[in-house]
């Protein structure tokens, strides 16, 4: 699998690409090393550059992470992104029978990894904090997820929307927990750690 070709395929012609992905032999290790790790590094590295090297201004006040905090935050974001992909795959696999799908941890990991492509690629915009709002383009990942879920998990098309919504709600809950953990470990400058 060529990384650039796969990214282009999943972003520009996802319906065709999901069919190719469905029958493609792979392993968890090759998915991580050949796809998930390189793409998950994009928002972490771009965010580090944007928040620690360039910084940003809010109402005339310059805000910037120290290099040490920026590196910690980037590493933590990267590792949590890897973990989140795996947890999302576990959720997808666990819920498959409830929506008429077939359980398959490998197929579930493919869905989690390849549907996250838009989110990871859009993370490049965090390199310039003023353009960070463009990271919203990563929401295209939701559409990719909706298209890929019934193909790879063999769920009936009429249940695809409900399956997608339930998995996304679970992923949001996990994402909020991850965000709280991240803030506790490396708080935003000027805000401190969140306390209950």
Image (cartoon, rainbow, N blue to C red):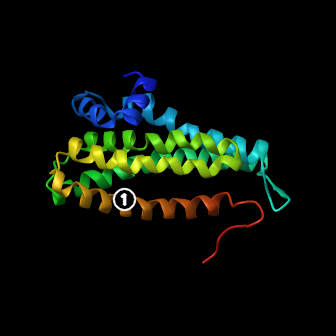
| Residue at (21, 30) in percent of width and height | 23
Note whether 195 is above or below 62 in the view shown. below
Q: Nearer the viewer, residue 6 or 133?
A: 133
Tell which residue pokes out farthest to the bottom in this image. 196
Q: Quadrant location of residue 60?
A: bottom right
Q: Percent from the top left, x then y, of residue 40? A: 51, 40
Q: Quadrant location of residue 173?
A: bottom left
| Residue at (79, 49) in percent of width and height | 66
Relative placement, left or right, of 170 versus 188 is left
Q: Quadrant of the N terminus?
A: top left
Q: Nearer the viewer, residue 131 or 120?
A: 131
**How dense is the environment of label 1, judged by Cα within 10 Å: few (below 14), some, or many (20 and up)?**
some
| Residue at (57, 43) in percent of width and height | 123
> Which residue is identified by label 1?
168
What secondary structure is marked by label 1? helix
Q: Percent from the top left, x then y, of residue 26? A: 29, 29
Tell which residue pokes out farthest to the top in this image. 2
Q: Quadrant of the C terminus?
A: bottom right
Relative placement, left or right, of 154 versus 67 is left
Q: Percent from the top left, x then y, of residue 194? A: 65, 71
Tell which residue pokes out farthest to the right in this image. 60
Note whether 154 is above or below 32 in the view shown. below
Q: Nearer the viewer, residue 149 or 95?
A: 149
Q: Percent from the top left, x then y, of residue 158? A: 16, 56
Relative placement, left or right, of 148 versus 142 is left
> Exactly how many numbered labels are in the figure?
1
| Residue at (63, 63) in percent of width and height | 184
Q: Quadrant location of residue 168?
A: bottom left
């Amino acid at each position: 699998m060529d990384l650039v070709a796969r990214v282009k395929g999943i972003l520009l012609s996802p319906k065709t690409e999901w069919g190719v992905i469905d029958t493609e032999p792979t392993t968890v290790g090759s998915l991580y090393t050949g796809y998930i790790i390189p793409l998950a590094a994009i928002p972490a590295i771009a965010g580090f550059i944007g928040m620690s090297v360039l910084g940003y201004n809010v109402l005339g006040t310059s805000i910037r992470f120290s290099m040490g905090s920026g590196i910690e935050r980037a590493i933590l974001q990267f590792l949590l992104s890897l973990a989140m992909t795996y947890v999302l795959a576990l959720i997808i696999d666990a819920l498959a029978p409830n929506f008429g799908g077939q359980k398959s941890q490998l197929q579930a990991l493919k869905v989690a990894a390849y549907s996250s492509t838009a989110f990871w690629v859009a993370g490049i915009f965090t390199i310039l904090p003023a353009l960070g709002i463009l990271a919203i383009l990563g929401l295209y990942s939701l559409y990719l997820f909706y298209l890929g879920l019934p193909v790879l998990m063999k769920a009936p098309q009429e249940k695809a929307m409900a399956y997608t919504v339930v998995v996304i709600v679970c992923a949001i809950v996990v994402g909020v927990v991850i965000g709280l953990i991240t803030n506790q470990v490396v708080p935003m400058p000027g805000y401190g750690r969140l306390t209950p």
